Amino acid sequence: LKQRHASIPVIKIKKPSMAFKLKVKTTLKQRLSALCTILMHIDDSWPFHDPVSESVAPNYFSVVESPICLSDIKRRVESNEITTKEEFADAVELLYSNCLLYNGEFSVLTGVAKVIKVKCGELISRLTNV
């Protein structure tokens, strides 16, 4: 608040930020769906976008009991099967643990899955409930 003259105050008003507008106008469902899209844009995350096939990963379904990919997670968010931040984080944890189980600790894929999991944790902690 500046004063030009002793009796006339001058008030500067800042324009509301776009982040504020998005925060106000989006639901948790929309944010979780957007979060999934962000995770899909992580470098080298493409192997986790779509379901695994036996032709690419032999015996995968005999090793992994509950397969999941980022497309599955997004579909579950959009169909209200995943409705909380915790359920979303659990689904991403399952993606990571499946990769670890099938590929082993030192696989490049497991490294990428870990990056997805860590990024998810960072972003989900910043989401507020509606």
Image: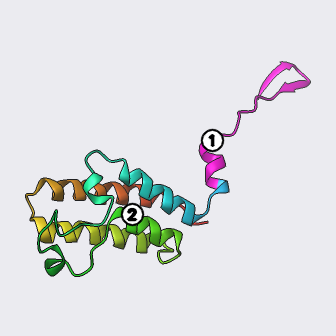
Label 2 vs label 1, nearer the camera: 2
Whether residue 46 sits left or right of residue 76 in the image: it is left
Return the residue found at the far top.
Answer: 4
Q: Determine crowd level at label 1: few under 14, some 14-19, many 20+ residues with C-alpha closer than 10 A.
A: few
Q: Determine crowd level at label 2: few under 14, some 14-19, many 20+ residues with C-alpha closer than 10 A.
A: some
Q: Which residues are magenta?
A: 1-23
Q: Is residue 122 above or below residue 103?
A: above
Does residue 18 show up?
Answer: yes
The quarter of the image holding the N terminus is: top right
Does residue 127 show up?
Answer: no
Q: CA distance from mark 2 to mark 1?
A: 27 Å
Q: For the image shown, how many numbered marks are present on the structure?
A: 2
Does the magenta-highlighted stretch encompass residue 7? yes
Q: Quadrant of residue 121?
A: bottom left
Residue at 80% over, 29% down: 11
* Residue bearing mark 2: 71
Residue 85 locus on image (x, y percent): 46, 69
Residue 36 locus on image (x, y percent): 42, 58
Whether residue 28 sits left or right of residue 101 in the image: it is right
The quarter of the image holding the C terminus is: bottom right
Does the magenta-highlighted stretch encompass residue 80? no
Residue at 76% over, 28% down: 12
Residue situated in front as seen by the camera: 75 or 115: 75
Residue situated in front as seen by the camera: 5 or 68: 68
User: Mark 2 belongs to which amino acid?
Assistant: Ser
* Residue bearing mark 1: 18
